[in-house]
Amino acid sequence: MSKYMLGDRSEALAEISNVVNQAYEFGHSHTTVVVLLMQLMIEQFDRNFSKAFDISQKMMSICSENGFNQWECSAKILHYWAKIHLDKENSQGIIQNVLSMRLNYGNRLEQNYFYHTGIRY
């Protein structure tokens, strides 16, 4: 992310791609989600809608499988951001769907992140 912010776009994209591959190899879902979010944000800054859409789908799937509700919320925000740009004809319908979905989804965010990690205090 820092390299992208400092203007080294190509190196940032290459590095985050490598880090994502390493996270998948490592097999730790939380690490994978965090680096996917970094990759997703770089694609958002780059306004690469289709790549952001694809990454957000991967991220949402991992989050859903593992109960990472807060990370899933970030993925969904960027997923629908990309979807609206990719499907401008239906953007109003997409926005309405997101607004109605928000009411249901908000309740799931009440579950504390640490609950899902197994840490109890």
Image: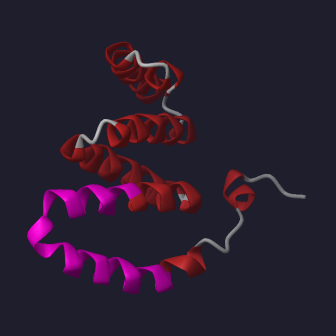
Locate residue 35, reporting x and y percent.
Answer: 49, 34
Tell me if 72 is positioned left or right of 112 in this view.
left
Quadrant of the image occupied by residue 99: bottom left
Quadrant of the frame with the C terminus: bottom right
Q: Is residue 34 magenta?
A: no
**Figure coloring:** secondary structure
The stretch of residues the image draws in magenta is 78-104
Locate residue 49, reporting x and y percent.
Answer: 23, 47
Quadrant of the image occupied by residue 24: top left
User: Between residues 11 and 32, which one lies in front from this camera angle?
Assistant: 11
User: Between residues 59 and 8, which one lies in front from this camera angle?
Assistant: 8
Residue sitting at 72 percent across and 65 percent down?
Answer: 112
Residue extending furthest toward the front: 7
Tell me if 78 is positioned left or right of 47 in this view.
right
Q: Measured along the vertical axis of the image, is residue 17 above or below residue 103?
A: above
Quadrant of the image occupied by residue 106: bottom right
- What number of labels is visible? 0
Q: Is residue 87 magenta?
A: yes
Residue sitting at 26 percent across and 55 percent down?
Answer: 82
The main secondary structure of the magenta stretch is: helix
Locate residue 13, reporting x and y percent.
Answer: 34, 22
Q: Measured along the vertical axis of the image, is residue 119 above or below residue 98?
A: above
Q: Measured along the vertical axis of the image, is residue 57 above or below residue 30?
A: below
Q: Measured along the vertical axis of the image, is residue 41 above or below residue 121?
A: above
Residue sitting at 48 percent across and 56 percent down?
Answer: 74
Residue extending furthest toward the left: 89
Locate residue 68, reporting x and y percent.
Answer: 56, 56
Residue sitting at 31 percent across and 52 percent down?
Answer: 57
